[in-house]
Amino acid sequence: MKVFYKKESLFKFINSLDASKLSIGFVPTMGSLHHGHISLINKAISENNHVIVSLYVNPTQFDNKLDLEKYPRKFEADICFLRSLACSKLSLFIPSDYEIYGSQINKELFDFSGLDKQMEGKCRPGHFNGVATVVMKLFEYVKPNKAYFGEKDYQQLLIIRRLVDNFKLPIFIIGCPIVRDSNGLALSSRNLRLTKNNRAYASKIYRILNYVKENFETLNFFEIKSWVNNQFEKDSIIDLEYFEISEDLTLKTAHKKVKKIKYRAFIAAKISNVRLIDNIALN
């Protein structure tokens, strides 16, 4: 596995691949790799001639400086983890802030046709502009045919697809299913900041989403939201930030069920000041 720290070295390598005749898969990550990331990487390996994984904690998508400082970083362990896959089709890009942004770390502004006005966009102002800024730069450097994103960040997945459509980029964006721990908790790098007990307790988030899915046909939206809010109202360990039922493609908040519309439930909550998000398809 080749490891690149400079974009110029990455450019030379990509050009040597003769990308016009090969399919290049790309898996952008912020490191602290877990089996959710590995599922993306394995899918990319199975569908492409070569796969590039990036490890980069992007500062412009953090609205909270403390969250950025505490975000887990273990790039040396990540490199060993990826080497253990023993895959000759895999390369790694680990850029510095300067390699990505130069001397000025700034985010650009994008039009996402309202997809960024819901949920994460409301709670984390500017977050998706930061995500789009770094993704556009990484797409420019890697020039992938296919890029892989997990459905745990479902709103982000739709926004990346909109970004690619808006700029008419020749990249196929592939969403991959959420990978969960044995207790149902969605795998996330932030889980590393949880104690063993809190990680077990956080599985409550998935149990609630599962209940919503199982009862979606029999309960109306008011009944569902009331039930969910009640589950957190007296919970001294998990603080609910939001719970939403939204249209699957537009992310507009849903108020009543309409035939032929797909819906998805979204949740964000904090446990010991660690912010977790999750979602589930309802129909």
Image: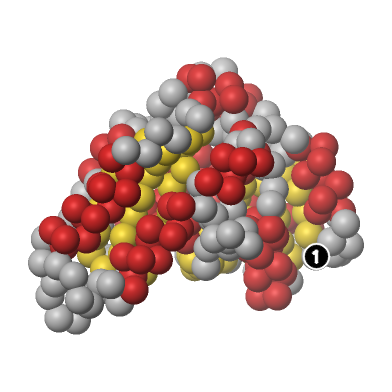
Q: Is residue 235 left or right of residue 181?
A: left
Decide which of 144, 200 is in the foreground and name it.
Answer: 200
* The one of 19 and 148 positioned closer to us in this rendering: 148
Where 107 sits versus 90, above or below? above
Residue visible at 66% across and 41% down?
A: 196
**Which one is in front, 143 or 78?**
78
**78 up-or-down from 182: above or below:** above
Which amino acid, mark 1?
A: Lys
Query: Which quadrant of the structure image shows residue 210?
Result: bottom left
- Judging depth in this view, the residue of 181 and 56 nearest the camera is 181
Q: Residue at x 59, y 25 (%)?
A: 70
* Residue 16, x across and y down, in percent: 79, 58
In what quadrant of the picture does the N terminus appear? bottom right
The residue wearing badge 1 is 89
Residue 235: x and y in percent read 37, 39
Residue 18 appears in the picture as rendered = no
Snapshot quadrant of residue 189: top right
